[in-house]
Image: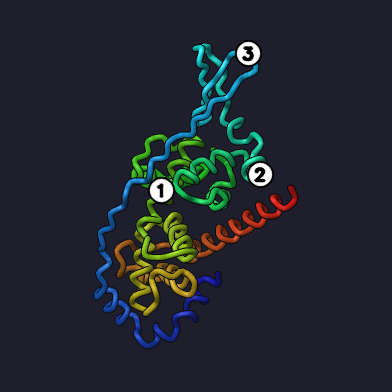
Amino acid sequence: MGGASFLVVAVRGTAATLGVAAVGALLHQQHPKTVVEVPAPPATAPVVAAARVARPATWSLRAGGWYIRVDGAEVPVPSLMEQTASRPRASLGITISPFDRLIAYHAKAEGFDWRLIAALIFEESHFDPASRSDKGAVGLMQVRPIAAEAVGAREFETPAGNVQTGVQYLRQLDEMFHAAHGRERLAIILAAYNVGPGHVRDAQTLARAFGYDPNRWQDAMELMLPLLEHPSIYQQLPNGYAKGSETVAYVHRILERYEHYKRETLAASASE
């Protein structure tokens, strides 16, 4: 996006009419403190299937990637890489990363398209499970302790725990911003994943003050979020300063990559 100069042009007419003092007055008239009850993420039972092994009269149970011999004899448990990297094309259409199966499993559990989660992970960590930020975010989905606490997760540094926690948190954000719909809602929850739900609510307050729809992304929230970088505005909001321009660019990159992954899936299916 064009940063501050782009936004000044976008809201110049309104700002010129209202002025900074009027914006403050409008903000004080808002009542953004809405309590939103977030239902617990739906539990998903593991898929359990029986499969015959090589030796005659020997059976095993497979549950969530773990293999248990019926006769009690121990067998090797597949490694994480074996579980996530084995033949992804057979069921997912395309190969994006070594963690495709893991991503697909947890995405399905929370009702998300696995390609969307893959696009988010690419943006967050480039599929590096050892990635860490200076703000305390870790793993494939760059989960922060505050996000893990929000969904009651204790183990979020392993690839499996990190993806599960990140997807559950994304689902929680989806419930928080349920008033938006479709692609608008998707963009808003991605923004909340990046900058935090508090800052998104502040941007929604600004949208109402300027006469925009707080539940629309295009030509609304994408214009309001960068205003959180301006002292005359963010100092009057509950959650203060945020790098709103970076968040807008972040959302656009993920949505573009998501569309790219969907096109690749269609192309792979057509060639089979």
Q: Position of residue 106 (x, y in %)?
A: 49, 42
Q: Position of residue 18 (x, y in %)?
A: 34, 85
Would residue 207 appear left or right of 122 to someone viewing this image? left
Classify 10 Å Cα crowding around label 1: few (below 14), some (14-19), many (20 and above): many
Of residues 199 and 102, which is closer to you in this image? Answer: 102
Q: Position of residue 3 (x, y in %)?
A: 52, 71
Mark 3 to mark 1 CA distance (whole Å): 45 Å
- Residue 248 seen in render: yes
Mark 3 to mark 2 CA distance (whole Å): 34 Å
**Element marked by disc 2:** loop
- Residue 131 seen in render: no
Vertical order, 148 against 218 (above or below): above
Q: Which mark is residue 264?
A: none
- Please name the amino acid that badge 3 sits on: Pro
Of residues 97 and 22, which is closer to you in this image? Answer: 97
Residue at numbered disc 1: 169
Vertical order, 2 against 192 (above or below): below
Q: Which mark is residue 95?
A: 2
Residue at far bottom of view: 17
- Please name the amino acid that badge 1 sits on: Tyr
Say which residue appears at 37% left-offset and 60% top-offset.
Answer: 177
Classify 10 Å Cα crowding around label 3: few (below 14), some (14-19), many (20 and above): few
Mark 2 to mark 1 CA distance (whole Å): 25 Å
- Please name the amino acid that badge 2 sits on: Thr
Q: Earlier in the sequence, mark 3 or mark 2?
A: 3
Residue at numbered disc 3: 56
